[in-house]
Image (cartoon, grey):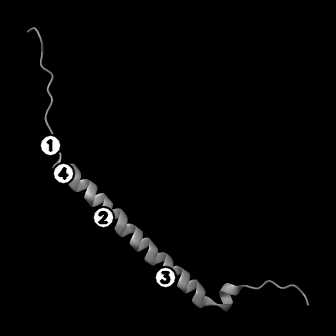
Amino acid sequence: MPLTKRSWASEEPGVILDFVVVFLVLCGILALIIQKAWRHRQAERAEWEVEEIRDVEKGS
């Protein structure tokens, strides 16, 4: 029996499609988690009170 190169991906295209769909869904979920964390951080920063600091000249 000669050794031949077999490509399981060409024989089973549905498996590759499944991998691609799962990958895209996981990327979407990860993007939503990152967006939620980023918006939460932006909301916290918006609540900060910013005070202006000025250098006061001394002696004049």
The image quarter containing residue 35 is bottom left
Which dot marks residue 46? Answer: 4
Three-letter residue code for mark 1: Glu
Residue tagged by mark 3? 21
Q: Earlier in the sequence, mark 3 or mark 1?
A: 3
Is the residue 19 above or below the residue 53 in the image? below
Distance between mark 4 and mark 2 Cα atoms: 15 Å
Residue tagged by mark 2? 36
Three-letter residue code for mark 4: Ala
Does residue 29 appear to the left or right of 17 in the view shown? Answer: left
Distance between mark 1 and mark 4 Cα atoms: 8 Å
Badges 1 and 4: C-beta atoms under 8 Å apart?
Answer: no
Three-letter residue code for mark 3: Val
Q: Residues within 10 Å of mark 1 (few under 14, many from 20)?
A: few
Distance between mark 2 and mark 1 Cα atoms: 23 Å
Q: Residue at x 59, y 87 (%)?
A: 15
Distance between mark 3 and mark 2 Cα atoms: 23 Å
Residue farthest along the top direction in this orientation? 59
Element under label 3? helix
Element under label 1? loop
Badges 4 and 3: C-beta atoms under 8 Å apart?
Answer: no
- Provide residue 32's location: percent of width, then percent of height: 35, 69
Element under label 2? helix
Quarter of the image with the N terminus is bottom right
- Provide residue 6's location: percent of width, then percent of height: 76, 85
Q: Residue at x 54, y 85 (%)?
A: 18
Element under label 4? helix
- Provide residue 11's location: percent of width, then percent of height: 68, 91
Q: Residue at x 18, y 46 (%)?
A: 48
Quarter of the image with the C terminus is top left
Residue farthest along the left direction in this orientation? 60
